Amino acid sequence: MKNIYITDLDHTFLRTDLSLSDYTKKIWNSYAKGAVLSVATARTYKKTLQFLEGVVVNAPMILLDGSLIATIDKKIIDTKFISQDTANEIINEGAKMGIYPFILSLTDKNLNEAFLYSSILNSYQKEVLTRYVKDDNLQEQKHIRAMQDNFKIVYMGDETLLRELASNLKTIYEDNLKFILAPEAYVGCYFLTILHKDADKSHGIQSVSEAMGFDLNNLTVFGDNFNDIGMFELANISVAVANAQEGVKQCADIVLKHSNDEDGVAKYLAEVKNA
């Protein structure tokens, strides 16, 4: 039975500048014939493919925090959407506090995506958008409204404000939605991600396991942030990079000596291969 390796991207597999070293690509790809290889990320399908150029992925990918499971060749395995009505209600609740989200939506079955954002932005959102200026899926809206199929809603801002919003929304939706509040390492704020209740990396791995027919006892996962803990609990071996959040390290079976900027995942895989 093949071993399975699934890695988070940002601050785990990718360097902080969003690149991959030739060394990481070489070591990862050296496992291609004998192992199942995939990723679990908050990123969209299109962005993930851009980052993984030259990297072998031979299993369905867990995308958008588990709200989309899809193969490299655009075969959709599973989706978990927030409905249009629910998304618009969430937007209204945030508007009462003077904050507006990013919304990641699916526009068609060919995995074309829309990145919706309000014309009212805070400084953190403005900085994030500078990284997406070349993308063709950006849609600015004066009065932001959701689409039919919404993968996730993301607010960015101060921790106190987002914690209050999350508390308000949990009172309304209870366990019908998933809320992830975590530090945003790139711009120095917090982000609140709102998802379908079953949209997470753990459910995503279950979907990939069913599609591929692999044994979770052979699964090793890599991560750094709180949205990785679900798959840590599911995997036989969970590995946190040296730069992972402290709470994530406490949940990991192995904490690496090396960070994402030091090819931590690849160095671990090289050691395993040579053991």
Image (cartoon, rainbow, N blue to C red):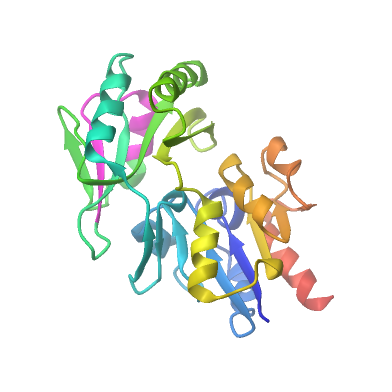
Look at the picture and state if 134 lies above or below 210.
above
Q: Quadrant of residue 32?
A: bottom right
Where does residue 252 sit, x and y in percent of width and height? 74, 49
Q: Is residue 63 left or right of residue 232?
A: left
Is residue 100 in view? yes
Where's residue 81, x and y in %? Answer: 33, 47
Q: Residue at x 50, y 16 (%)?
A: 160
Does 198 sit above or below residue 182? below
Which stretch did the figure color magenta?
A: 113-129
- Name the residue at 68% across, 50% down: 233
Q: Is residue 194 above or below residue 136?
A: above
Residue pushed farthest left?
142
| Quarter that holds the C terminus | bottom right
Q: Is 116 in the magenta?
A: yes
Q: Per the image, is 170 magenta?
A: no
> Quick check: can you spot residue 19?
no
Eyeballing the image, is 119 above or below 64?
above
Number of callouts in the render? 0
Q: Is residue 125 left or right of residue 26?
A: left
User: Residue 192: x percent and y percent?
Assistant: 45, 31
The structure residue drawn at horizontal position 27% and vertical position 62%, both measured from the top left corner, is: 111
Q: Residue furthest right?
A: 275
> Which residue is pictured at 28% across the width and 34% down the height?
87
Question: x, y (%) of residue 84?
Answer: 23, 39
- Direction from residue 22 to residue 64 in the image, left or right: left
Of residues 171 and 257, which is closer to you in this image?
Answer: 171
Task: Assign the N terminus to one quadrant of the image.
Answer: bottom right
